[in-house]
Amino acid sequence: MLALRDLQLAIGHTVLGHDEASLADAIAEGGIAPASRLQIYRHHYEISLTEALKAIYPVICRLVDERFFGYAAHEYIKAHPPRRPCLHEYGESFADFLASFPPCRTLAYLADVARLEWRINASLHAPSELPLAAGAFRNVAMGDYPRLVFRLLPSLGYLESPWPIGRIWSGREQVVDLGQGGCRLEIRQRGEEVVFARLDGPEFVLRQAILAGERLESATAAALAVDPLFDLAMALRRLLGEELVTGFSLASDDSQTSF
Amino acid sequence: MTAISSTGIGLRGPHLAAIVAAPPAVGFLEVHPENYMGGGPALGALERLRCERPISLHGVGLSLGGTDGIDQGHLERLAALVERLEPALVSEHLSWSIVEGVYLNDLLPLPYTEEALDLLAAHIDQAQTRLRRQILVENPSSYLSYRHSTIEEPAFLAALAARTGCGLLCDINNIHVSGCNLGFNGEAYLAALPAGAIGEFHLAGHSINDVDGQKILIDDHGSEVVAPVWALYRAALRRFGPRPTLIEWDSHLPALPVLLGEAAKADAAIREETGNARAA
C-alpha cells in the first residue's frame, strides 16, 4: 500500500506525462485499465491548461492558427507547469518561451504580441483604485516638486517593441507592414475594460520611470535625455488628466511622507 | 452575510454583462474565488451584484487533501475575498490538486483511509479557523478508485463533518457520475450522508465517453442536467429537505435563459418534493 504522499507523487508524475508503474497495483481496475483511467486526468490537465492559455493569448492563437497554438501550448505546459491555482496568473513566461521556440524563429514579432496580451490580462486582473483629484497637489510647494514620488494605477503597464504590435493585435488590417517601425504602449484599466494608447518617447520614459518609483526629478531627467525640449508641465497635466495617479509622497534622503 | 433562498446559477464571464445589466431572479450567484483574486472590473461588478443577491464562493484551489499542506498564501487571498464579499456560502472539494508545488488543475481523487481522514480534517480545521466560518466540502466526481481505501466515500464525508464541523456540498451529478464509473448506487450513497451537514446541492451536466470499450461519464459541466440526475436530486430533496441548489455550467456555456430554465426546473422540483417554495 502506497502512503498518501507517495501516491500523490506518483499521480502527479503521471498527470505530467510520466508513467508510474507503482500505480498499477494501487488503482482498482473494474473493466478499465488503471493507465486508461489515469489518462482521463492527464488529458484534462493538458486540455484545460491549453484552454487557459488560449483565453489569455487569443491573438497569438489567431496569428499562428489553433493547431500550431495547441502544439506550442503542449510544449510550454510540459516545460512550465503551473505553480498557482489562479489560471489567469498562468502563462507569464509564454512570451519568452515563444521567443526561443525554434518553430517560431521566423515570426520575430510574436513574442512581443504575447507580451502585450499578458500585459492586458494582468491589467484586467489588477486591483481598481480611484485616481487623485486634479487639485491634489495644491499644497505641495513648487520647491518640493523634485521630491514627488507618484503612485500610479495598479493596472498600469508599459511596453516598447520594435514591431507595430498594437496594429497586429487589433487585427483590423489584413496586412500589417512590419517595416513601419515599433511602438511604445501604455496599458491600463479604464472603467470596465482595458485599453492601450501609444506614447511618444519622452512621455513613455517619464511615465515608465514614475511607475518604477523614481522621484519626479530623476524621471524628468530621463525624459529630458530623450528630448531636451520636453514639456514637463504639460506632461504632468496629462498624467493627472488621464486619471493615472492614485497617490503621492515626498521623498527625502531618509524618509517619505505620504499623502 | 445573507441567507440563501431557492436556486442559484454559476456566474461566468460571458454572462457577466447581461447579469449586471438585468440581475435575474435567482436565489444566489456562485463564483470560483480564484477568478477574482487580484481585482479588476469583474470583482467590482461582483461587489455591486452582492448588494442584490447572496454570493457563494466555490473554491477549486485549496487542495484540502494535498500532502504539500495548505498554501498559506492562497488561503490568505481567499480570506481577503471572504472578508470583502461576505459570501453566504464558502465551499471547497474533497480532493487534492497540488504536489511538489505543481498545481495539477484538477480535483484529484483521494484514497479513503484513516491517514487521508486525519490530513483532511487538519486542513479543513486550518481553513475554517483562518476564514472564521464553516466551509462546505463537496463530494468529487471520480474516474478511478484505490484498492487500499478502507472507508466508503459518504462515510468518509460524514466523519469529516463530525470531526471538523464542516458542512457538505452534495453534488448530485458527481454522485451519479462516480456511481456509474465506479459501480455504486446513488440512492444508497445519499442514505449514508448525514442530513444535518448538507448545506448545498449542485446540479450539472456530464458527457458520456468510451474508454477501453467501457462507458465513462465525465463531469464536464457542459450540458443540461439529465433525467437520472434530476431523479436523484428529487430523492435528495425528499431525504434532506430543501437546500440552496446551484446549476453549474462551465463549458459550452449556453445563453443565459437556458441556464435560468434549468434553475426554474430545480425550483419546481423543490416545490413538488418538499412543498416548500424556498430552500432553507
Image (cartoon, coloured by chain):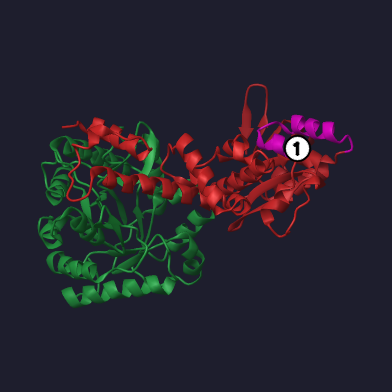
Query: What subunit carries mark 1?
Result: A
Residue B108: image quadrant is top left
Q: Quarter of the image holding residue A203?
A: top right
Q: Chain B is drawn in which colour?
A: green
- Percent across and percent down for residue A157 are 64, 43
Badge 1 amino acid: Leu
Q: In this view, does B221 lie above or below A216?
A: below
Residue A139's place in the image compared with B238, above or below, is: above
Q: Which residue is nearer to you in this view: B25 or B143?
A: B143
- The boundaries of the magenta stretch are A207-229
In the rendered image, the residue lying farthest to the top is: A254
Let me know if residue A153 appears in the view. no
* Vertical relation: B144 (above or below) B217: above
Disc 1 designates what residue? Answer: A206
Q: Which chain is tinted red? A: A
In this rendering, position of residue A60 left or right of residue B89: right
- Magenta stretch: residue A116 in it? no
Answer left or right for B25 relative to B243: right
Could you tell me residue B117's position as x and y percent? 17, 39
Residue at the image position 74 percent from the left and 34 percent from the top: A216
Between B114 and B74, the one lying in front of the other is B114
Task: Name the element at disc 1.
Answer: helix
Residue in the image at 42% along x and 74% along y: B257
Task: Name the dominant secondary structure of the magenta segment.
Answer: helix
Q: Would residue A113 appear left or right of A218 to someone viewing this image?
A: left
Rendered location of residue B51, percent (x, y):
42, 63
Q: Is residue A216 magenta?
A: yes
